[in-house]
Amino acid sequence: MSDTIEKIKCLIIGSGPAGYTAAIYASRAELKPVVYTGMQMGGQLTTTTEVDNYPGYPKGTDGTAMMDDFKNQAERFGTEVRFGMVTNVELSTEVGGIHKVTVDGSKQIEAETVIISTGATAKYLGLESEQRLIGGGVSACATCDGFFYKQQDVIVVGAGDTAAEEATYLANICKTVTILVRKDYMRASKAMQARVNKTENINVLYNTELDEVLGESVVEGVRAKNNQTGDTQVIDVTGVFIAIGHKPNTELFKDVLDMDEVGYLITEGKSTKTNLPGVFACGDVQDKEYRQAVTAAGTGCMAALDSERYLGALE
């Protein structure tokens, strides 16, 4: 453990659209924020090759370049961005209390406010071919990437509401959508299943699993396997959407902050306030509905404003 304890006004845990936007607003409010980026600087958006739906980029951009823009803007106003992982927290339950944070197992920080923007991680199947082609036709976000597959054939893997929502969204854009369901039924709500069933260009294959994604640099098809008969078939598609859920990155705050049954942080009303004073949450770590860069950035702004107002009320 380090003997030196750093004292700061505003600590932002996690980068990405939410964290960097919080930093921009916090630094302009003279809160002198420090951002610890986590192991994936820029967040999961850096795994997206093309971003066409974020305002202000009329010609589009890629996720890494966009996050570099966010980072540079935050630093221009005085934000200190550091590469490192928060490994332990002791969050105060008192108004005006000091929150104690450990970074990389040794560095000690005492923060007056903490903004959590650690995001959520998309769940994947773990196939080598799937991982290799992320960004080359494999995606975990139809809203983000569906546009690139206009009038093309795509696959959705999953059986819950997320898969049904992704499939019906894609059906409005793509030529055909095939859903691979591992069991002989879908777990989605009856309402969502009804939407799937009445959509003419959606085909559901039950008892079917994704065996391999085909293609070298881009998706050229998939090999699907019937887990009852063992039979395989090749389906020609250009896009594969994995819709088996997301996991919020909240292990660090378990039994400390209020969460829902999945692990998303619960915030108060329309604010970013958690159940502890001076601790705020923004972005995908508290949003399981939208999960978009623009909505994450919006809540990052809110978290900085909430932090500023909290500190102002203490003076």
Image: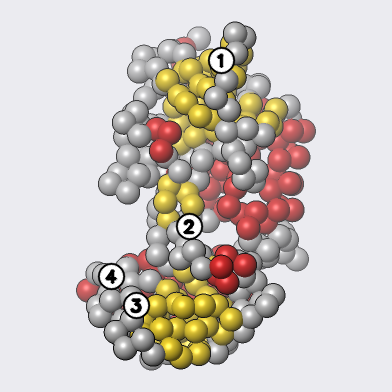
Which numbered disc, 4 or 3, marks the residue closer to the eye? 3
Residue at the spot 52% in from the left edge and 39% down from the top edge: 117
Residue linked to disc 2: 122
Q: Are marks 1 and 3 in contact (CB under 8 Å)?
A: no
- Disc nearer the start of the sequence (3/2): 2
**Residue 94 percent across, percent down from the top left:** 36, 14
What is the distance, in whole Å, between disc 1 and disc 4 at their CAs? Answer: 48 Å
Number of numbered discs present? 4
Asked if the residue at tag 2 contacts the one at tag 3, i.e. Cβ–Cβ closer than 8 Å, the answer is: no
Give SS at disc 3: loop
Q: Earlier in the sequence, mark 1 or mark 3?
A: 1
Q: CA distance from mark 1 to mark 2?
A: 33 Å
Tell me the distance, in whole angstroms, between the alpha carbons under discs 4 and 3: 11 Å
Label disc, if present, on residue 181 of the rendered structure: 3
Quarter of the figure with residue 194? bottom left
Q: Is residue 14 in view from this perspective?
A: yes
Q: Which mark is residue 188?
A: 4
Question: Which sits earlier in the primary sequence, circle 1 or circle 4?
Answer: 1
Q: Which residue is mark 1?
A: 1
